[in-house]
Image: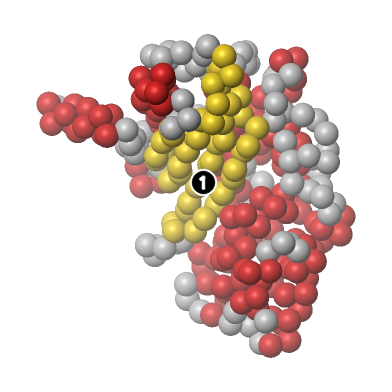
Amino acid sequence: MILKCLFVWIMAATGVFSLSAQELHATVKVHGQAIEGTHGQLIASLEEALYNFINGRRWNDFSVRPNEKIDCTFTLLITDALSAGTFRGELYVQSRKQAGSSSRMMPMLNMRDKQFEFDYTAYQPLLFDLHAVRDNLTATVAYYVYLILGLDADSETPLGGTPFFRAMEQIAVAVQPYGWKGWERDRNSRSRSVMATAFNEGSGEVFRKMWFQYHAREVDQLSASAVGGVENGIFAVAALAQLYDEQPHSVLIPLFGDAKLDELTLQLSNAAATEKQKAYQTLREIYPTRNAVLEKLR
């Protein structure tokens, strides 16, 4: 017990938290060079508070064995102190999933949230109630926890992430009276509210069912044969093309691209020349700014 406490203390002292508890195995880091001179203790306190908040609570009602915890990273870059106790920054959220029985980790989420303003005072515990959302810090972090859990559940069971995506939507609705940035309802934006809606509306099922099939085939086939990987990639491209035709500005399209496009092009690199060319043309239309990645298919 003494050794365990000492280990936790050492991790806290170094400013990196990556212990596992409940559903998530999250590494948390807060960078605040822009405000470090006057807020050094606050940065360290916030880092620990976020670690405890993310890792130290149950986010769903299902029991989770230790080897099933989701590996993820939350990195907060504080860029400005707007006033006493109010800050602006960027939040980077990533999650990964083990590919079957192999040691290879698949990226599941790679998100950069550039519209993040929040209140915090040093040594303040972070509390959250899905039914009574009161501050933007816990609302935003909880939102991304539910997104991680939803994507993971959808990869295991068709539409299995529905409860988590509904929780995202519940948060997005609850914060509207506050007018916090990043929660706008403008469908032309990539806001948190718009993404929550995308996962919960009927048209999102095309993406979500593809997400399940993609990962089911990934686990079952990709590690076993190049052919399985090609079939997996072609299936994903077709589903993305359908979504793009129906909703070219869907936030789910960049969400997939930011996490999966490198992986997808690697799968398709073993395809026949005609299949690769077709995939290249389709993906180039969907992701016109990702030429460096897509060049692997030429």
Above-or-below relation of 273 to 136: below
Q: Residue at x 74, y 46 (%)?
A: 251
The residue at 73%/81% (across/down) is 277
Give the image quarter of residue 24: top left
Say whether residue 218 is left or right of residue 180: left
For image coordinates 77% across by 74% down, the residue present is 281
Q: Which residue sits furthest right?
A: 246
Q: Is residue 102 above or below residue 230?
A: above
**Image location of residue 112, percent across then percent down:** 59, 43
Q: Quadrant of residue 196?
A: top right
Foreground: 224 or 30? 30
Residue 291: tell me if it is visible.
Answer: yes
Residue ID for mark 1: 94
Q: Give the vertical position of 108 relative to 294 (above or below).
A: above
Pointer 1 local density, CA inside 10 Å: few below 14, some 14–19, many at least 20: many
Whether residue 212 appears in this view of the structure is no
The quarter holding residue 69 reads top left
Dot 1: what SS?
strand
Amino acid of disc 1: Gln
Out of 280 and 198, give the one closest to the viewer: 280
